[in-house]
Amino acid sequence: MNQPRLKEFYKKNVAVELKKQFNFKNVHQIPKLTKIVVNIGLSEAKENIKVLDIATAELATITGQKPLVCRAKQSVSNFKIRQGMPIGIKVTLRGAIMYEFLDRLINMAIPRVKDFRGIESNGFDGWGNFNLGITEQYIFPEINVEKSDKTRGMNITIVTTADKDEHAKTLLESLGMPFKKKIMDTSNK
């Protein structure tokens, strides 16, 4: 099996540039992707269980892997949730599938967002991981709009081995993640 295009690009170009830029002494210090977790919250699944099947099929189509159903760990009466009820689905991607998904996310899905001006870089958590929220699943070309019942948002968490947010942001920028550029004010006041 061929290596994913993005993984090959990382090994040949990105890793070399990161090693030079941050003066890493060891190859293992270079930040790399560990896993990508994609999850969808399904609060409406408590009334209509068919929503779970539709969302599971859509997420499986997007990621290429069958999602895990997340169930409530305890009952919450204010939200009308009982212990064991399905409340969401998630997929953890690693290896070649992870690189394929990130490649499709960066090059095909994100450019399809309406009025897109870049991704906010405030999604880093302080340990080199990045969280990205997407408001609708229709930006992925694999989703058939006619078969889908409603728009669903999803959270994408990109986990890296970077110990600083600066290193993780540089890694993701090098892989092609379109972050917003900060515009400096040059006018004199």
Image (tube, rainbow, N blue to C red):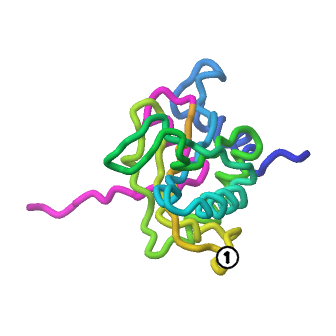
Left/right of residue 47 with respect to residue 60 in the rendered view: left
Q: Residue at x 67, y 70 (%)?
A: 143
Q: Residue furthest top?
A: 25
User: 38 or 34: which is nearer to us?
Assistant: 38
What amino acid is labelled 1 in the image?
Lys
> Is residue 159 something that shows in the picture?
yes
Left/right of residue 12 with respect to residue 126 in the rendered view: right
User: 178 or 132: which is nearer to us?
Assistant: 132
**Residue 131 against residue 127 in the figure, above or below:** below
Left/right of residue 171 with respect to residue 58 in the rendered view: left
**Quadrant where the N terminus is found in the figure:** top right
Residue 112's x, y, as percent?
56, 72
Q: Which residues are magenta?
A: 161-189
Q: Residue at x 41, y 58 (%)?
A: 180
Residue 140's x, y, as percent?
63, 67
Q: Residue at x 66, y 23 (%)?
A: 27
Q: Residue furthest bottom?
A: 146
**Residue 144 against residue 82 in the figure, above or below:** below
Find disc 1 in the rendering and name its residue. Answer: 147
Circle 1 — which element?
Answer: loop
Residue 51: in magenta span: no
Residue 30's x, y, as percent?
60, 28
The total of numbered circles placed on residues is: 1
User: 20 or 59: which is nearer to us?
Assistant: 59
**Residue 29 against residue 67 in the figure, above or below:** above
Residue 125's x, y, as percent?
40, 36
Q: Residue at x 47, y 64 (%)?
A: 135
Residue 176: in magenta span: yes
